[in-house]
Amino acid sequence: MSAEPPPNRFDLASPAGRLRTYLDYLWNDHAYLRLGFSNAHWISDELLRMNQPWPHQIAAWKARGIRTVVNLRGGFDASFHALEKDACERLGLNFVNFTITSREVPSRERVLGARALFEQLEYPALMHCKSGADRAGIMSVFYMHFRKGLSIREALDQLSLRYLHIRHGKTGVLDYTFARYLDEGEPKGLGFIEWVESPAYDPAAIKADFRADMWGNALTERILRRE
């Protein structure tokens, strides 16, 4: 788990400050798109994946048994983080920050950190990124593999269009990472962690070999503007 983030620049102590924070969240974080759509899926009886929740949605999920909220976005100086952290504190929920990116091959430390995270969480837990598609997707693959014991091939179902993941743009580097393991590590009898801990796992080289489709880039970067 990551260290405690620095103080947030959004002030929720006053009504005016809270209003400014909500307005920033509504517009700059595109939160208006998520009022009626949460991309929420229970992937087991203990873990829910979804897009960025509003504070009132966090309260509703607590009422359904959620004990921990996991933020995969980072954004420690952003309005969404201020509102989410405040909501969790008021509701008595655990709030965990575990930053991962959607356009990079995860570092060895991130992979091992994800395994440790799923061993330490207090469940049931809610895990989210901005859209609930890419970062929530790769972390769901890790969860299904590390905690539920599925093979990587089976767990890859978590990176699919069903959850709005687009593999043809830059976010396809996540799929490519696992494809490299299935092409190189699995045939040699290596478990996923064995492969990640071996010299063959070179995030920079794997990313350099990845090629995204032009139309996929247009979709994820210009139209959907995925984070």
Image (cartoon, rainbow, N blue to C red):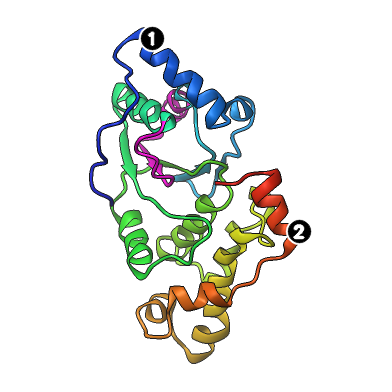
Q: Residue at x 42, y 21 (%)?
A: 21
> Quick one: which residue is furthest to the bottom in this view?
188
Residue nearest the observer in this picture, 41 or 161: 161
Mark 2 residue type: Trp
What element does badge 1 sit on? helix
Magenta region includes residue 8: no
Q: Residue at x 66, y 60 (%)?
A: 169
Q: CA distance from mark 1 to mark 2?
A: 43 Å
Q: Is residue 48 above or below residue 208?
A: above
Q: Is residue 189 above or below residue 120?
A: below
Mark 1 residue type: Ala
First in sequence: mark 1 vs mark 2: 1
Q: Which residue is mark 1?
A: 16
Q: Is residue 14 above or below residue 220?
A: above
Q: Residue at x 33, y 25 (%)?
A: 86
Q: Which residue is mark 2?
A: 215
Q: As drawn, is 187 to the left or to the right of 74? A: right
Q: Position of residue 129 (x, y in %)?
A: 49, 44
The answer to whether any part of residue 65 appears in the image is: no
Q: Position of residue 197 (x, y in %)?
A: 35, 79
Q: Quadrant of residue 16?
A: top left
Q: Which residues are magenta?
A: 58-78
Q: Is residue 107 above or below residue 216?
A: below
The answer to whether any part of residue 184 appears in the image is: yes
What element does badge 2 sit on? helix
Residue nearest the observer in this picture, 17 or 163: 17
Q: Position of residue 2 (x, y in %)?
A: 28, 50
Q: Position of residue 174 (x, y in %)?
A: 55, 64
